[in-house]
Image: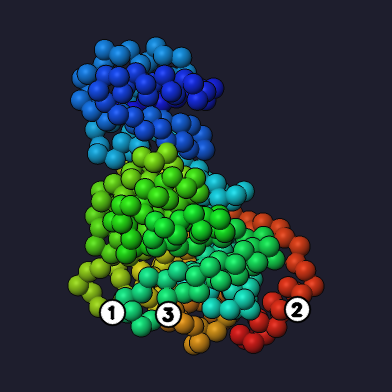
Amino acid sequence: MVVVMAPHATAEHMAVVVGRVRAAGGDAFVARGRARTIIGIIGEVDQFESLNLRNLEGVADVVRISTPYKLVSREHYPDRSVIMVGEVPIGPDTMTVIGGPCAVETAEQALAAALMAKSAGASLLRGGAFKPRTSPYAFQGLGEVGLKILADVRAETGLNVVTEVITPEDVDLVASYADMLQIGARNMHNFALLQAVGASGRPVLLKRGMCATIEEWLMAAEYIAQRGNLNIVLCERGIRTFEPTTRNTLDISAIPVVQRLSHLPVIVDPSHSGGRRDLVVPLTRAAIAAGADGVIVDIHPDPKLAMCDGDQALSAADIREFACVATNLSPVVGRTLTPAPDAGMSAYGMRESAAALQRSA
């Protein structure tokens, strides 16, 4: 059961609802989204019927939810949610591109990749400072140094930062630099981490686990929502199947399925799902055509020298084709490509960016 609060509801109104539920032996969790606030109720539903919650001041509706993921379910949301990352919307009317290097390596590399991403139509910058890798000997990221580089690149380009956090202990540190926190596929079932990012107040990008069902994915989102944060974007990044030709198998059907089950936006990662540069643009076409709310792509000024996932990173030679697809195909499916924010480049930034792009050509 969930209590949908009216737009004018105050903190006092919510406290009355929560107090009444807990006095009856249940528990309640307040989850705030951009457009509305809902209160999820846990306990025997029948015992709450006599509380007459609908008549409490500030309450718009009380809804029984049949799905186990009550807060992220579409059942009580007539319209799908729009999640804001700063001034950048991710939702049903837009096509939002998130682009940048899989891993931050140097300041020059990150800035060059950010400019390439912006020219490709990206309105948000992705970049990894902490990298959970299959091999313990692989590059694990620059840590806080990488976060500082991302913050500097944001200042130069105006692109808000999406970056991964891999432990609950690092959430506050990463949130102090990032505009959106990413939960990677390997951490989708890290419940302590999900709860920590839920309490952070930052928007969250939640990737589907490699072997996760759609219900498990949505239940992971529920962990975040239950800590008061409904600003969640789901990312389909390919699942592990028997097929070895591609890195993963993009579950394109997950896009419309999840959009019918949940009010949360759904984006696609064509880089990690295919694992090959030549598949990124075709999979992006498929994602847009299937109704994805955005894509997140790897971009590198010199993929041959990349310390992480260079085989799947778009290079300078690929940017024009990708930008053409994102720009021209989005209106065909009734979407507007989210514009990149304006930002005044410093003379230093312009020189460094031009030099980095020239080296990548």
Q: Secondary structure at mark 3?
A: loop
Q: Which comes sooner in the sequence, label 3 or label 1?
A: 3
SS class, disc 2 = helix
Place residue 207 in its image quadrant.
bottom left
What type is the residue that disc 2 sits on? Arg
- Picture residue at 45% right of the left edge, 69% below the top: 130
Which picture quadrant has residue 159? bottom right
Q: Are marks 2 and 3 in contact (CB under 8 Å)?
A: no
Q: Residue 229 at what x, y percent from top left? A: 44, 42
Name the residue located 46 percent from the left edge and 82 percent from the top edge: 307
Q: Is residue 149 above or below residue 258?
A: below
Asked if residue 242 can be seen in this view, the reply is yes
Say if mark 3 contacts mark 1, CB within 8 Å.
no
Task: Looking at the image, tell me whether mark 2 or mark 3 is earlier in sequence order.
Answer: 3
What mark, if any, has residue 351 been given in the picture? 2
Q: Which quadrant would the N terminus be assigned to in this image?
A: top left
Q: Quadrant of the C terminus?
A: bottom right
Image x and y of residue 78, in percent: 41, 32
Q: Residue flagged by tag 3: what amino acid is it? A: Phe
Mark with earlier residue (2, 1): 1
Which residue sits at x=49%, y=83%?
306
Q: Which residue is mark 1?
A: 245
Given residues 120 and 306, the one toward you in this image is 306
Q: Nearer the viewer, residue 301 or 169?
A: 169
Indicate which label's residue lies in the foreground, 2 or 1: 2
Q: Which residue is mark 3?
A: 139
Q: Please rate how many residues cluster around mark 1, counting C-alpha atoms within 10 Å: few if below 14, some from 14 to 19, many from 20.
A: few
Label 2 and label 3: CA atoms lie apart by 29 Å
